[in-house]
Image: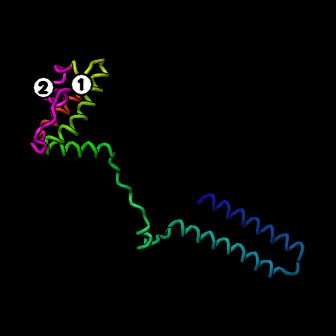
Amino acid sequence: MKRRVIGWGAFALLAAIGLLLARVFEPGRFELELDVYILVVGGVALLNVVILIREAYPLERPVTQIARALERDEPEPQRLPELERVERELTMATATSFDLHTRFRPLARDIATARLAARGRKLEESEDELGAELWALVRPDRAVPTDRHGAGISPESVERIVERLEAL
């Protein structure tokens, strides 16, 4: 606001100098010169008042239906495809013994092998470290189940195996 007042005063001074110059070069037209001066200064004052009012009360544009339709919603966070694949495999492993053997077992075996390899150990030599339940699942000589539609692994067993894998 202070900056605008200084600008307003500078403009009024400039207009007064213009009026004085007009009086010096055209002395017989005082009424016209005064009218032009008042018109210019009044116009600038009116412009400043309009600007101040717009700043004090900005326009609020109503949001139309089209504008609302064009607004983009925040995209929902995408789940990792690998995580979804593991969830599907775990779900299937709890359903049938064949899915347990062909889907969850290789995943648990790969994780156990990688965790043990990080400590310089081999899977075949780590039966004691893995525990009975995890070893029964990942042991190299585990046979393919004869009843493919037999019961899979329980969710509680999956939880214990995952905790054991995390502990390695």
Q: Which residues are magenta?
A: 126-152
Residue at the disc numbered 1: 168
Name the residue type under label 1: Leu
- From the viewer's perspective, tell me whether residue 95 is left or right of residue 69: left
Q: Is residue 131 magenta?
A: yes
Give the total number of marks visible in the rendering.
2
Residue 163 drawn above or below residue 65: above
Residue at the disc numbered 2: 132
Say the numbered circle drawn on residue 137.
none
State the residue in front, 91 or 47. Answer: 91
Which quarter of the picture shows residue 121? Answer: top left
At 58% from the left and 71% from the top, the residue drawn is 50
Query: Residue 101: where, in percent of width, then height?
Result: 18, 37
Between marks 2 and 1, how big is the CA–CA gap?
A: 14 Å
Name the residue type under label 2: Ala
Query: Residue 97: where, in percent of width, then height?
Result: 13, 40
Quarter of the image where the C terminus is located: top left
Q: Which type of secondary structure does the marked residue at label 1 adopt?
A: loop
At 59% from the left and 60% from the top, the residue drawn is 1
- From the viewer's perspective, tell me whether residue 28 is left or right of residue 137: right
Count residues near mark 2 (Cα–Cα under 10 Å), then give few for <14, some for 14-19, many for 20+: few
Comparing marks 2 and 1, which lies closer to the viewer? 2
Q: Is residue 19 magenta?
A: no
Q: Residue furthest front?
A: 146
